[in-house]
Image: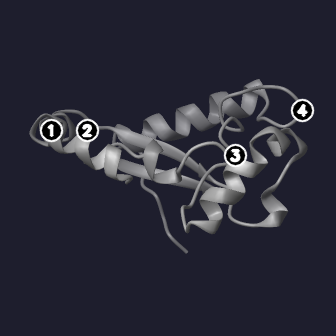
Amino acid sequence: MTSLQDCLVGERLDRLEALGRAFPILSVAGAVDSADDLSEHLAVTLPWMLWMRAEGIRNDGLVPTGSAVLPFSDYVVFKGTDHTALVSGGPLGLSADHRALLTQALLALVAGEATATRH
């Protein structure tokens, strides 16, 4: 987290932890880790993305990946996925059917009806 985030979260840490214990929360984030992950619609944010990368900040092309992860939540980071790919349509995003399937899978994880397996 950035120092501003630390400051803002620090003021609310007890409340955030209580929410994390009371409700199943799953944060979803993306990460553009290599040149292979770049797409032409990132051209607008390319300077920002490259600056964050040069500073050692993992990001999704628009915001730091860590900013998408709520404190005290389980989380999933989709490698090679930019800021909008998981939620928007269009030629560079997931189709409506794939967004629906992803949402169902993530809800199943949160509800405890599925488990994640690491390979």
Q: Which residue is mark 4?
A: 91
Q: Amino acid at mark 4?
A: Pro
Distance Cα–Cα, label 3 vs label 1: 30 Å
On screen, 47 above or below 26?
Answer: below
In the rendered structure, which disc, 2 or 3, sits on the residue that comes first in sequence? 2
Q: Between disc 3 and disc 1, whose residue precedes?
A: 1
> Viewer-nearest of labels 2 and 3?
2
Q: Amino acid at mark 3?
A: Asp
Estimate the spatial distance between the alpha carbons at disc 4 and disc 2, rounded to whole Å. Answer: 36 Å
Task: Give the residue number, with chain letter if any, for mark 1.
Answer: 11
Instruction: Kindly check if marks 1 and 2 are in contact, taking CB atoms under 8 A apart as contact.
Output: yes
Q: Give the image quarter of residue 21.
A: top left
Residue at 37% across / 54% down in the picture?
1
Q: Secondary structure at mark 4?
A: loop
Residue of label 2: 8
Residue 20's tag is none
Q: Residue at x 81, y 38 (%)?
A: 44
Q: Nearer the viewer, residue 5 or 30?
A: 5
Q: Which mark is residue 82?
A: 3
